[in-house]
Image (tube, rainbow, N blue to C red):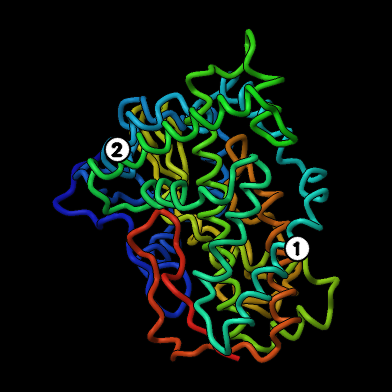
Amino acid sequence: MTPTTETPRFPVPRAWPPGAPPLYTAFRETGGPHEVTIWDGTRHWLITRYDDIRAVLTSTSFSADVRRPGFPLSRPAQREQEAGLFMRLDGAEHARIRNMVSQEFTVRHARVLHDDILRITDDLIDAVLARGDSADLIRDFALPLPSRVICLVLGVPYDDHELFHRHAASVVDLDLRVEERERAAREAFAYYTELIERKRAAPGDDMISRLLADHTGPGGIDPDHLPVLVGAMVGAGFETTAGQLGLGVLALLLHPEQRAKLLQQPGLTDGAVEELLRYWSITAVDPRRVAVEDVEIGGRLIRAGEGVLLSLIAGNHDPRAFGGGACPADRLDLAREPRPRHLAFGFGTHQCLGKNLARAELRIAWPRLFERVPGLRLAVPEEELSFRNDSSVYGLRSLPVTW
């Protein structure tokens, strides 16, 4: 990488109003990869254009393996903690393990869960309404909903949710000290190891039991790796969905005309979910890759061993991809057409495994909340809202509402 006297720091905090940080937008409109510096002082390339991001995520010239030299780590000890996780593998080994796990996250499985997701949504709304005329929708709705759903899928007792909440929070907190992160990882590993042994002794109708039955023999998932894999899926199954749930509610509160479209035209629901995913693009510091051979992206040669960072918020607000029609790419339009495939779940072979489950939760939760609480409104000025810029998953710290 060509040395420079100074490069911008990545990630750049998002500011209000919503959208890509101005620096990312400027990079995108200039075109091509740009040098940035990350937390450990190393320099890497930042990709911001929609087509360039897709090109990286579908190219075998880039690796997702944190063990490779030059990989741009998001935090201290990431290499040690994530080495060997299937989402950090490439090629056939990644595909082999992903295929075993992905059977539990199909569209069909998500549809089977519809009634359970609706029941959980209604239970949470009932509890919110029973407590009075105000709530924090992050604490009382956005966090517990996907947490309960992923517990149901994996067969994890919800009574133990505080432990895996702590573990998942430690994974996404970019500022957490290494010792605290390692302590949370050890605690979670011990818990999931014990849970797996209980499932082995008394299987149930859940994902962990099926993985044990179908994929832990010869050629299956390494038994020593299974607790780490389960922990990763628990965390990924609710941190991102919780962040998206809260931000989606906020967007609908701030755009009453868009909220009216959603409620009055049920046929828009699927498209509205995709637009809200595109609009917020909550994955803040991933995906990340390292080049395994020299390759040209966006008119610039990236050499083997150089790291690449991808800004999904910049790509998903690229006017070349989403600027058609009357609504600019940086505006929210639940009826946006035509609609290319957004990048909120990533792209290519490493696309988010839980995307079907997340979509199922969002398409149920958002309309149901506003149907049952039509007078929902912010309890504080929007300028007073606090956002999580110290996390690998963008979101609200709290969402005070009243009705």
Q: Nearer the viewer, residue 83 or 177?
A: 177
Q: Amino acid at mark 2?
A: Glu
In this view of the protein, which residue sits in the foreground, 296 or 114? 114
Kind of element beneath mark 2: helix
Q: Position of residue 168 (x, y in %)?
A: 44, 48
Crowding at mark 1 (Cα within 10 Å: few <14, some 14-19, many 20+)? few
Residue 58, placed above or below residue 167:
above
At x 46% / y 53%, what residue is drawn? 162
Looking at the image, residue 145 sits to the left or right of residue 191; the answer is right
On screen, residue 20 versus residue 234, left or right, reads: left
Label annotation for residue 188: none
Residue at the far left in the pictured view: 5
In the drawing, does residue 2 fall left or right of residue 150?
Answer: left
Residue named by callout 2: 182
Task: Give the labeled residue for mark 1.
Answer: 119
Please provide percent x and percent y for residue 88.
47, 31
